[in-house]
Amino acid sequence: MTFTAVELIETKRDGGTLSSDAIEWLIGAFTDGTVPDYQMSAMAMAILFNGMSPEELAVWTRAMLESGDVMDFSDIPARKVDKHSTGGVGDKISIPLAPLVAACGVAVPMMSGRGLGHTGGTLDKLESIPGFVTELDTQRFREILTEHGLVLAGQSGELAPADQKLYALRDVSGTVPSIPLIASSIMSKKMAEGLDGLLLDVKTGSGALMKGIERSRELARTMVGIGESYGVNTIAFITSMEQPLGTEVGNANEIKESIDVLRGEGPDDVTELTLAFAEAMLILGGIDSPRDRLDGAIASGAALDKLIEVTIAHGGDPRVIEDPSLLARAPREAVVAAPFDGYVTRCDALTIGAASVRLGAGRAQKDDIIDPGVGVSVKAKMGDRVTAGDALAVVRYTDESRWVAQRHNLASAWEISIEQVQPPRLVVERINATSF
């Protein structure tokens, strides 16, 4: 059956339902270039406003999945478990998590993405390691996973290519927060990996794509449902993103903080989430006494060794893992200072994330080049006591004009009061197929 993109856009714009044939045609035509970016952007906006029915979402996800290859790792004896985050500010969890889990005997075919909007991307962080190649074809992806039990890559051109195109388009068309588009994007990639288990980290709060708990819960349940429908045991954690995770926001500086975690020296919040997710992934992978295994992998250095090992496999320079001072560092530095004494009652993740992107740590357009040395070191978070003049943040930047444009905006991320508040708990909720 022949369709036109305009009629399908109009149908969804007016709140209608797309047929299975229409969705399959649209995804195929977008993948092969028949439907141009500007029309798919219009469709994405219509979906953002009007959503998709469960039946539409199932067909859309399947069409995205079947737009390319599906991997088969059944010959690898270890169970295959991956993790995905919906994106946050300072969210470097995947980087220490993956080698930690792999060091405990679970294969991790981690397929990550780039930054979306104000949120950072795992691939962008990894590429701040000199020489680290994240773009792998399917054969090289398999070789690294087989040899090392871990691969840290982006999706290849052969795997869900429709999603690869739409993912970049959503970032620059204002359509990132759509639950159907998020769910289908994540799950089409993950279901193409041939997984035995999947852990999802769904952020909620000011710095998350989903600001409120109800939408975060809806997204988590949607993705868990998709995973289970494909026979993949799927667990979702809903975690707080009111303030940045850890103390570092950027790319190279987040790599350093990830290394600290694997050395047992990381910030409490990043360490707590890394261990909670790792324990769940080991359970999905069938590993007994998971917490003991994790503690042992950190204490023995096996987890850090696994990161070094996989860095070499990806062509990266292992010296920066052994000595993080060799990582990129922007040449200029400035301090955001506390204006008066009191307690930090707000450390807004969205404001900090957006400012870091505009300083050069992220992309405003899909072909922008990231400066890996740009970053924000957060020195005071919710509940902390500060004195006038204390550093709330230290900013490293390259372009003076960008800093001048962002300094007042960045300073507005903090609020200080005479009343002390408690930071929000990290894990808000855990959802699996039996939770709804």
Image (cartoon, rainbow, N blue to C red):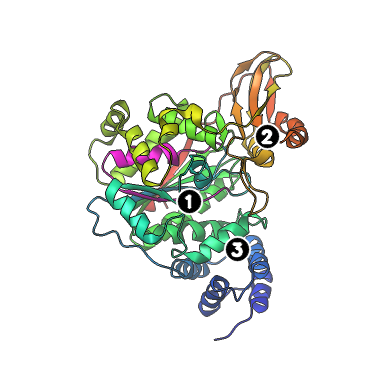
How far apart are the alpha carbons under marks 3 and 2?
41 Å
Report which residue position mark 3 lands on: 51
> What number is the disc on residue 362?
none
Residue 421: image x %, image y %? 60, 23
- Residue at position x 32%, y 51% from top? 145
Report which residue position mark 2 lands on: 398
Query: Which is nearer the eye, 407 or 157?
Result: 157
Query: Which is nearer the eye, 132 or 28?
Result: 132
Query: How busy is the neighbourhood of tag 3: few (under 14 within 10 Å), some, or many (20 plus)?
Result: many
- Residue at position x 66%, y 61% from top? 49
Kindly check if marks 1 and 3 are in contact, taking CB atoms under 8 A apart as contact. no
Is residue 99 a member of the stretch shown in magenta? Answer: yes
Report which residue position mark 1 lands on: 220
Quadrant of res 406: top right
Answer above or below: position of 75 versus 372.
below
Residue 277 visible? The answer is: no
Residue 324: image x %, image y %? 47, 29
Closest to the camera, between mark 3 and mark 2, is 2
Direction from residue 347 to residue 68 in the image, left or right: left
How far apart are the alpha carbons under marks 2 and 1?
38 Å
Is residue 295 a member of the stretch shown in magenta? Answer: no
- The amino acid pointed to by label 1 is Ala
Element type at mark 3: loop
Closest to the camera, between mark 2 and mark 1, is 2
Answer above or below: position of 209 versus 58.
above
Direction from residue 102 to residue 90 in the image, left or right: right
**First to last magenta residue range:** 90-115
- The amino acid pointed to by label 3 is Gly
Query: Which is nearer the eye, 390 or 7?
Result: 390
- The amino acid pointed to by label 2 is Thr
Tell which circle, 2 or 1, labels the residue nearer the N-terminal end. 1
